[in-house]
Image (cartoon, helix red, strand yellow):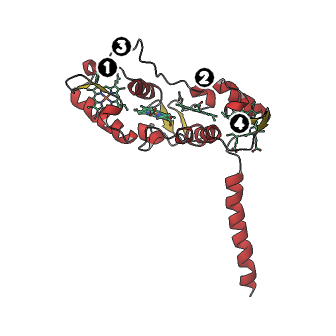
Amino acid sequence: MGCMRILPSLLLLAVGGIWVQAEGNALDTSEENMKRIARSLGVECTHCHLATDGKVDYEAPTPLKETAIHMKVHFVDSLKTADGEALRCVSCHNGAARFLPRDVKGAGPSNLSERMDRKEIIRMMRRQAKQLGVTCDFCHARSEDGRLAPAQPTRHKLMAKYMMDHFAGKLVTLDGKPATCQTCHRGQAEFLPRSRH
Ligand code: HEC
Ligand code: HEC
Ligand code: HEC
Ligand code: HEC
């Protein structure tokens, strides 16, 4: 009998615990921190928050709010630099919401094959393709005869090169394992909540 009475309250506690977690803030929502985040990305509050008729609804969910929470949970709280420094929004964003290189104008051909053994290159490329869930053609152009032209710049190749230089190997997980493409991408090229909308 006593047991029967205790059980529901335990269940309630458990459910309450989950609810509290789901409703808890991933990001510190103080005005000071919100201002800092906006500054780190070089944006206004309304980049992430919904404004209707000049009134901002800070509570309403938006794709960029979800994206910001993804960054906090998976990047800021899960990774650090190889020399042990904590990450902040500004560490990667440095004042810009979108900072990845995308413009192929002025980008020359790459010369990796002059610096690295061909077999090694292909092995690395296959691994990257798998970790992003794509084929070689996602990043590389083809010449007129249909052959892969891997030295030629493309938008996705520029973005990949940026990740190779700034993220993979330069960042580590909290237990010290070097971040790979898989750490963030998990088999998908686009994975941010902003990309689903
Ligand atoms: C980069 C995106 C981003 C920017 C820019 C931003 N916010 Fe936020 N804001 C969020 C996210 C995400 C949350 C929800 C955090 C959570 O629930 O963990 C939030 C929550 C809030 C909340 C609490 C809302 C609630 O649910 O109670 C307030 C208030 C707020 N922001 C104000 C501001 C103000 C003021 C600015 C401009 C100075 C600003 N925000 C800029 C992403 C942003
Ligand atoms: C490890 C690096 C890294 C860290 C740390 C990081 N971000 Fe990002 N963030 C990115 C990358 C990469 C993109 C995609 C940029 C692009 O498209 O040019 C991005 C994009 C975003 C976007 C979408 C911008 C848009 O307009 O499409 C938001 C919002 C965002 N980040 C918020 C944050 C917030 C808030 C923090 C800190 C809590 C943060 N990020 C920390 C790497 C990072
Ligand atoms: C996610 C993007 C991406 C995918 C997918 C990809 N590559 Fe690459 N590839 C690159 C980048 C970036 C470079 C240049 C790296 C550098 O300069 O350090 C490169 C360079 C190369 C090179 C050397 C070219 C040179 O610079 O001399 C070869 C060969 C190559 N890739 C073949 C392949 C093959 C084969 C596949 C499919 C199995 C493939 N790549 C898939 C991004 C990609
Ligand atoms: C610290 C996290 C992180 C790591 C590590 C990382 N990336 Fe990314 N990458 C991102 C984010 C965030 C985006 C933006 C995704 C989106 O828009 O949904 C992105 C986007 C890309 C894109 C453009 C995809 C598109 O469709 O626009 C390419 C290509 C890419 N990454 C290649 C790589 C490669 C190759 C590696 C490994 C060498 C790598 N990334 C490692 C975070 C990371």
Q: Which mark is residue 94?
A: 2
Q: Which mark is residue 152?
A: 1
Q: Residue at x 42, y 14 (%)?
A: 105
Q: Earlier in the sequence, mark 1 or mark 2?
A: 2
State the image coordinates of residue 179 (x, y, percent, origin top left). Answer: 45, 37
- Examine the image and state in which quarter residue 148 appears: top left
Along the line of sight, which residue is nearer the eye, 98 or 69?
98
Q: Is residue 30 shown to the viewer in this render? A: no
Q: Are the residues flagged by discs 2 and 4 in contact, CB closer than 8 Å? A: no
How many C-alpha atoms fall within 10 Å of the one at disc 4: few (<14), some, or many (≥20)?
Answer: some
Nearer mark to the viewer, of 4 and 3 = 4
Q: Amino acid at mark 1?
A: Gln
Give how far apart the Cα atoms at labels 1 and 3 are. Answer: 7 Å
Q: Residue at x 31, y 32 (%)?
A: 137
Q: Earlier in the sequence, mark 1 or mark 3?
A: 3
Q: Disc 2 on helix, strand or loop?
A: loop
Q: Are the residues flagged by discs 1 and 4 in contact, CB closer than 8 Å? A: no
Q: Earlier in the sequence, mark 4 or mark 3?
A: 4
Q: Amino acid at mark 2?
A: Asn
Q: Are the residues flagged by discs 1 and 3 in contact, CB closer than 8 Å? A: no
| Residue that carries the numbered disc 3 in the rendered image | 108
Nearer mark to the viewer, of 1 and 2 = 1
Along the line of sight, which residue is nearer the eye, 182 or 176?
182
Q: Which mark is residue 49?
A: 4
Q: Amino acid at mark 3?
A: Gly
State the image coordinates of residue 190 (x, y, percent, origin top left). Answer: 47, 38
Q: Which mark is residue 135?
A: none
